[in-house]
Each structure stands twice: as C-alpha cells, then as structure tokens.
Image (spheres, grey):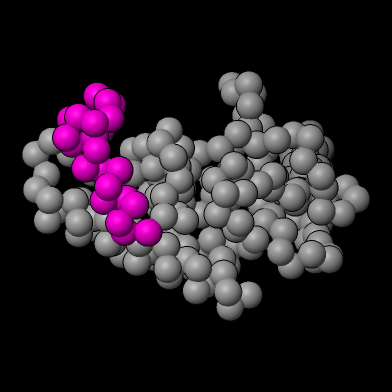
Amino acid sequence: MNNKKVYILALGLTSILLLSGCNDDGKEKVKHEENKVVKVSKIEVVKNDNAQEIKVEKKVIDKNQSKSYYYDYNNIKSEYDPNAKPANENASVRVKPRTQLDANMHVRSPYEKVQISLLVGKLSKNFRIKCSACHDDYANGIIGPSLLSRDADYIYKKIDEFKSGVKSNPLMSDLIKKMSNEEIRTLADEIYIFNQEIKKMKEKK
C-alpha cells in the first residue's frame, strides 16, 4: 500500500515538473518576442539650396557589377559618377553630373527636362527613324551635328546635298535616298518648329 502511495506521489511530482517546464518555455518564448527590436528605416531630409540641381538617389552598388548606374528622365542608362558632390554631408542623395546632352540643351532642372521630353514626344516617326540615331531624339546631336539652332532652309539644303551627292555620307545617303523633296521639306520644317518651341520655353525662364 505504501509503495502504491509513493508511486502515485512520484507520478504527480513528475507531471508538475513537466508542466512547469512547458510553461517556462512558453514564458521564455514570449519574453524573447518582447525583446525583439524593430528597426525603423531612417528618413533623411535633404536641404535643397539649389532648386536647379538635378538630384538622384544613390544606388547601392551590386557586387556583381563593377560600376553603378542611374537612369535619367529619358530612361537612358548613364554611368554614375562616384565622385559627384554630395547634396549635404553624409547624404544618400548626390548631385547628378550634367551630361553633354544636358549641357548642349542647357537643361537646368528635372522639370525643364520633362518639358523637353513632352515636346520630343510630338516629333514624327519619320524623324525618329531617319534622324534620331545620329542627331538624338531632339535634334541635339550625338554623332551628327546639333540641329537646334538651324532654320528649315538650312536643314533642307544640307539634307539635299547628301541626297544629290554634293556631300558624301554613306549613312545619310542610305536614309534619305528614297525620300522625296516634299518629305525632306516636311522634315526640315518639323525640326525648325521644334527648335522654335524650345526657344520659347527657354525665354520664359
């Protein structure tokens, strides 16, 4: 009888210890969850001393790449200059170096660049196919000369010289040899009108 009581008592103590252990594990888990630190992303305020600066967020450099890149408003992939001047001390935003195209167009702000992009969107498919490869999407000149300051008669004359063989350029000749004089005149007028729109936009500043 006594052995039975001892057995029951031992069984009861074992059960209590097991329950206590489970309960302690639960408490430890809750305590661990409470001690977790939630990291909040740092919000950085950058003072804008110069509204005309074009600024872009610095991209984290991929280990698989040797260089970092940014995209400008025309979605053109451009090399990021790691030596660009920071907008403020320890900032994650840097002043984007002006490209040669920006310099030629005298683009002074992102807003102005968007305005130009809207005007570019109005240029004809014929211009994009025949001209943009060498003169850029807005006649600014990459391989070929800039057409921004030229009038319609000057542009027409230059195209006609390549078509007639007075001047030699294999690429130009292939692009315009099947164009009629009317098509060339329309293209020259289109570029001139675009130039005038750019001029008006600049004069409003």
Whether residue 19 can be seen here: no
Residue extending furthest front? 166
Q: Position of residue 26 (x, y in %)?
A: 75, 50
In this rendering, is residue 8 above or below 187? Answer: above
In this rendered view, identify the residue nearer to me: 90 or 121.
121
Residue extending furthest right? 89
Region in magenta: 151-175
Whether residue 148 can be seen here: yes
In this rendered view, identify the residue nearer to me: 26 or 163.
163
Left or right of 79 on screen, residue 196: left
**What residue is at 60 percent from the left and 58 percent from the top?**
107
**What residue is at 42 percent from the left and 62 percent from the top?**
195
Residue 150: image quadrant is: bottom left
Secondary structure that dominates the magenta span: helix
132 in the magenta segment: no
Task: Point out the image quarter for the N terminus.
Answer: top right
In this rendered view, identify the residue nearer to me: 1 or 138.
138
Left or right of 8 on screen, residue 123: left
Left or right of 121 on screen, residue 70: right
Q: Position of residue 57 (x, y in %)?
A: 68, 50
**What residue is at 11 percent from the left and 44 percent from the top?**
179
163 in the magenta segment: yes
Left or right of 105 on screen, residue 2: right
Task: Point out the image quarter for the C terminus.
Answer: bottom right
**What residue is at 23 percent from the left and 55 percent from the top?**
187
Q: How many marks?
A: 0
Residue 106: image quadrant is: bottom right
Q: Position of residue 64 (x, y in %)?
A: 59, 21
In this rendering, is residue 72 above or below 167? Answer: below
In this rendered view, identify the residue nearer to me: 89 or 99.
99
